Amino acid sequence: MIHASAKISYAVVCAAGLVLAATGIGTFALGKAPMTHWVLMAHVAVAPFFALGLAALALTWSGLSRGGADSPLSGAAKALLWLVLLAGLVVSLSGVVPMMPLLGTQGQHFLYLTHRYSAIVLTAAVLLHLPLLARRKGNA
């Protein structure tokens, strides 16, 4: 059984992720990169909710994703959840580290590309994970 707190944390990550994907990936896909004005402000304003939701997701779902045969999740759902957590961590860190004067121009560019492509991986992992949750063990 998946507890309400786990469902809420997943919903927060998905809701914040939807805004972040629309402002980040959407802007890039429409050929309007880099983000500016209100789009950038929305992206930056929602990012902390995503990070907090990701931390809650790790706390509430990690037990379900390492359980044995009694886990309500399939092996693919477990693997995708760990991919979501890993990609989310990379997205978060590659978004925060450039705000500190630690790296030069090349390092900033590398982190920008890391942020972009790990966000795409994260989005794909969530989109693959959601249908598996709907068909989890014991639901049928």
Image: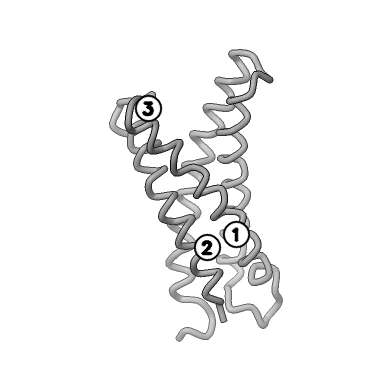
Give x and y (percent) for residue 56. 60, 59
Graded by Cα atoms within 10 Å as few (under 14), some (14 to 19) or many (20 or more), the crowding at tag 2 reads many
Q: Which residue is mark 3?
A: 35
Looking at the image, which residue is at 54% across and 55% down?
A: 53
Q: Residue at x 66, y 65 (%)?
A: 62
Q: Secondary structure at mark 2?
A: helix
Q: Which residue was labeled with disc 1?
A: 56
The answer to whether the residues at label 3 and label 2 have Cβ atoms under 8 Å apart is no
Pick whichever, 37 or 62, lies toward us. 37
Name the spot of residue 86 as percent of width and height, x first.
Answer: 63, 49
Q: Amino acid at mark 2?
A: Ser
The type of residue carrying mark 3 is Met
Q: Residue at x 58, y 23 (%)?
A: 110
Q: From mark 3 to mark 1, how far is it between C-alphas?
A: 28 Å
Distance from disc 3 to disc 2, alpha carbons, whole Å, reads: 27 Å
Mark 3, residues whose alpha carbon is within 10 Å: few (<14), some, or many (≥20)?
A: some
Of residues 90 and 83, the one drawn nearer to the viewer in this rendering? 90
- Res. 109 mark: none
Q: Type of residue at label 1? A: Ala
Judged left or right of residue 130, residue 22 is left
Element at label 3: loop
| Residue positioned 70% across, 68% down in the render | 66
What residue is shown with label 2? 9
Give percent across and percent down for residue 14.
44, 56
